[in-house]
Structures are given as C-alpha cells and as structure tokens.
Image (cartoon, helix red, strand yellow):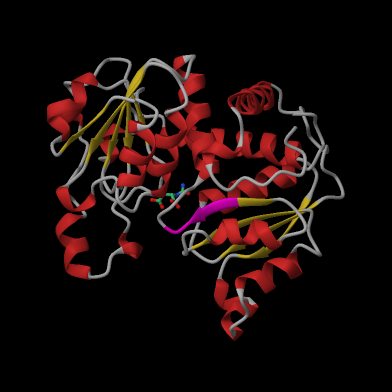
C-alpha cells in the first residue's frame, strides 16, 4: 500500500505498486471525473528551492483536480531559508501544516533528509543532480502508453548525462524490466556517473554502451530521451557555452531513426530539439508533460489514502 509512504528515489516503490499507479493514471486519462474530489480537505505543500514549471504546476494542478488545496513557495528567497533556517527545521514545521510535502532542492540527499524529519509523506521533486522520481513515473507512463510495455526496448539517453537527474532516475528504474538495453550518448565531459553504470546496470546485468555521436546509434533506438545541458550545475560559464549545443536533434538526423521510435524530453528544452520536429508524430514530449499530471494525481491520491493502491 502506498498510503503514508515517501517517494525519494525510483526504487522506493515495487514494480507491482508502479503498475497499479500506471493503471490509475490511465483511468484518470480515460475518464476526466475519476478521483475528482477524492482529496477534498487535504493540503499539499510544494517547497521549491529551485526553479520549476512542469513539476510544481503539475503537482498543484493534480492536487486541485483531486479537490485538495496547495500552499508553499516557488522561490526560497521568500521562505525562512533566506534567514538561515535549516532544511530540517523548515520541513518539521511544514509537516505540522500539510498532509504531504513535495520538495525540490539543489542539494543531493536533501529529500532523504527531509523524509527523516517529516511527520507526513515527502515526495522528491528533484535533489540536485541526483534523482527525480516523479519525472520517472511520467517517463515510464509515457513509454507504457505509447509502446504498450516497459520491457524489451533500447533507450538512448542523450545530452547532459552527468548532471541530468531525470536520466539517473530513469536509467535506474528501467533496469528493473526485462529486455532493456541502454545507450548513453554524451560528450566525454558529461558522461553518466559510475553509480548508475557500475552501481546499477552492471549489477543488474543490463547491457549498455556509450557513444559520442547520436548519428552513430540513432537507428538502433526505440526511445530517444533528449536532455538539456544543466547550466545551473556547471562550475564555469565557458564549459557550459562550449557544451550547450553539442546535440541538436533535427529532421535530417531523424531520417535514420526507426519509424516508431519515440522522442522524450523532460523539458524545459533549450536548443537540443529543433522546433521543426514538434509536429513529428514521434515527438511525444508535450504529451509526456500531460501524463505527468495524471501520474501525479494517481500518486497523491494513493499516498494520501484516497484510493487503495
Ligand atoms: C527536469 C529537472 O528539473 O530535472 N525538469 C523537469 O522536472 N521536467 C529537467 C531539466 O531541468 O532539464
């Protein structure tokens, strides 16, 4: 049962629990009235110490659609963090007011720390370059709805694989399904960390490879997961400028892709997918953002105990 549980990283929920969440999210997509008002009287705190559009707004939209209410901040400068309050004190306090907390924080491990002091469930909405499990729920639901299953696919992750937390979470989450191959496409400076390749994929015996050129591998992929270069995690501007346009997916590059390959992107997009591709039926990134709201509705209703899951 997910009632009362935290979600800090993708492995926190079993595959059966994920299946049930995806089933609920599918029902919400198919029937706009399903679970409406099921969280009336409940309060969700959204504490964003880093910028966000989709994650924060889709959580808030999800909670409002469930009939609940939201409070919180989108700007740490407007909270007591600006006065020097510790994260644990902020979380302890907010957990006296709300029924669940969604938090994004620039420090790796912040969500885990929050879950240890909170009186209510904590959902990690991104902790530095570490994990982003609800983006992973979004990505898995998108793949499942578009391809019918989560196993038996070759996925290419392209871009900033060093700092991209959505990549770390999805690469780890997919390693639990069978028939998965992972291809990591990045410049040498932005390769995927060893705690994912050695710590997860090799342990789980998931075949993976690394490449520098997207053109060399695009024809093998069933899913292409594009990411932006994570400017805010760079130590110097020059490196960012040198690497930011390393990959730009264009119509021309898509000529060699499979006819049914899907392109995912957690968004925001900067330059890495040409706008000319937005009308390509394989480009599903905006639909993916919509799935994010459905799966967050399913997640909130489950952890708040509004639906057995
Ligand atoms: C991602 C994030 O914050 O990690 N955005 C999101 O939540 N959809 C990806 C990114 O910022 O590049």
Does residue 50 lie above or below 65 as drawn? below
User: Is residue 252 visible from the viewing direction of this image?
Assistant: no
Quadrant placement of the N terminus: top right
Residue 262 placement (x, y as % from top left): 35, 24
Residue 183 placement (x, y as % from top left): 26, 30
Residue with the most extreme front position: 203
| Nearer to us in this view, 210 or 234 | 210
Q: Quadrant of residue 79?
A: bottom right
Residue at left 41%, top 49%?
165
Residue 298 placement (x, y as % from top left): 68, 34
Please report the bounds of the magenta region as a residue range: 124-128
| Nearer to us in this view, 255 or 38 | 38
Residue at left 34%, top 25%?
206
Residue 179 placement (x, y as % from top left): 38, 16
Residue at left 73%, top 47%?
64
Does residue 177 lie above or below 201 as drawn? above
Q: Is 21 left or right of 309, judged from the image as shown?
A: left
Q: Main secondary structure of the magenta part?
A: strand
Does residue 262 lie above or below 275 as drawn? above
Residue at left 17%, top 34%?
214
| Nearer to us in this view, 73 or 185 | 185
Residue with the most extreme right position: 41
User: Is residue 164 visible from the viewing direction of this image?
Assistant: yes
| Nearer to us in this view, 177 or 66 | 177
Q: Is 21 left or right of 217, judged from the image as shown?
A: right
């Amino acid at each position: 049962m997910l009632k009362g549980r935290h979600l800090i990283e993708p492995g926190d929920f079993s595959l059966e629990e994920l299946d049930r969440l995806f089933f609920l999210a599918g029902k919400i997509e198919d029937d706009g009235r399903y679970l409406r008002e099921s969280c009336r009287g409940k309060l969700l705190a959204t504490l964003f110490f880093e910028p966000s559009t989709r994650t924060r707004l889709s959580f808030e939209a999800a909670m409002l659609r469930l009939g609940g209410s939201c409070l919180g901040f989108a700007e740490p400068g407007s909270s007591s963090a600006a006065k020097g309050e510790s994260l644990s004190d902020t979380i302890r306090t907010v957990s006296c007011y709300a029924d669940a907390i969604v938090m994004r924080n620039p420090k790796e491990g912040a969500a885990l720390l929050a879950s240890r002091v909170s009186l209510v469930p904590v959902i990690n909405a991104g902790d530095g370059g570490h994990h982003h499990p609800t983006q992973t729920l979004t990505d898995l639901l998108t793949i499942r709805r578009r391809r019918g299953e989560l196993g038996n696919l070759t996925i290419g992750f392209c871009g900033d694989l060093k700092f991209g937390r959505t990549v770390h979470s999805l690469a780890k989450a997919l390693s639990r399904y069978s028939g998965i191959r992972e291809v990591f496409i990045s410049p040498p400076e932005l390769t995927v960390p060893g705690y994912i390749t050695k710590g997860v994929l090799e342990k789980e015996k998931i075949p993976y490879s690394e490449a520098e050129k997207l053109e060399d591998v695009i024809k093998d992929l069933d899913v292409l997961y594009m990411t932006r270069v994570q400017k805010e995690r760079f130590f110097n501007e020059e490196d960012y400028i040198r690497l930011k346009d390393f990959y730009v997916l264009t119509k021309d590059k898509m000529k060699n892709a499979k006819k049914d390959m899907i392109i995912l992107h957690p968004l925001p997009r900067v330059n890495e997918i040409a706008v000319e591709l937005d009308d390509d039926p394989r480009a599903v990134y905006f639909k993916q953002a919509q799935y994010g709201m459905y799966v967050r509705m399913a997640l909130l209703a489950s952890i708040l105990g509004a639906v057995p899951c």
